[in-house]
Amino acid sequence: MRIFIAIELPEEIKKKIDGFQKEISGRVLLRMVAPKNLHLTLVFLGEILETDKEKVIGTVRKGVMGIIPFGLFLGKPEFFPKWGKPRGLWINVEGQTEELGKLQHSLVCKLKESQFILERLDFSAHVTVGRTKGENKRVEFAPFRKAEFTTCSVTIFSSKLTPKGPRYSKIETIPLK
């Protein structure tokens, strides 16, 4: 099973991003991420054995220990990567990013201690809006306004790739304390 750990976005934040996606749909060529799939990825584990699911849950529980809820907000949308041909569009996440970094680092350390091999270690706080489906010129976008939220939990998701796009299923939501 294909696994990642993420912060779920509140519905009002997903609605704001959905509105933004609709607003830009005529200006950029993107396959938009479905609003129900919008999230902030903390760690991508990739393929694990079904029998390791409970081990992942226990490890993530250890990784969030001592992390208290913290505030974040949507920042400026921009194409990625920063240089060269754009592959997609994301929205930077700002706010208490030091706390976010501690959470992400703690999860990575605990997962490594539990002998999980992580596919990607680089981390940038963002929400992916869409992936390119043609040539896009780099366009400047205004930062989001009044798009704040409190991070109170992390969720372990499984991801199944389909021709219609990824399908995410929640495995477990673990609160911050």
Image: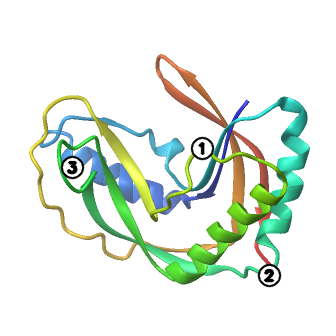
Point 65% across, 48% down: residue: 118
The answer to whether mark 3 and mark 1 are in CB contact below 8 A is no
In the displayed structure, does residue 123 sit left or right of residue 21?
A: right
Residue at horizontal 29%, vertical 43%? 88
Q: Which residue is mark 1?
A: 119
Residue at mark 3 to residue at mark 1: CA–CA distance: 34 Å
Q: Name the amino acid type tagged 2.
A: Gly
In primary-sequence order, the first of circles 2 and 3 is 3
Q: CA distance from mark 2 to mark 1?
A: 26 Å
Q: Where residue 87 sits: x, y (%)?
A: 28, 40
Residue flagged by tag 3: what amino acid is it? Answer: Glu
Looking at the picture, the colour scheme in use is rainbow
Query: Of discs 3 and 1, which sits in the foreground?
Result: 1
When the figure is inspected, residue 117 is found, relative to residue 132, above or below; the finding is below
Q: Amino acid at mark 1?
A: Glu
* Rendered residue at 9%/45% (across/down): 137
Q: Nearer the viewer, residue 124 or 26?
A: 124
Q: Secondary structure at mark 1?
A: loop
**Residue 105 placed where, x, y %?**
64, 69
Query: Between residues 54 and 170, which one lies in front from this camera angle?
Result: 54
Q: Residue 66 has which mark? A: 2
Indicate the secondary structure of the residue bearing disc 3: helix
The residue that label 3 is drawn on is 23
Q: Is 38 placed left or right of 63 in the picture? A: left
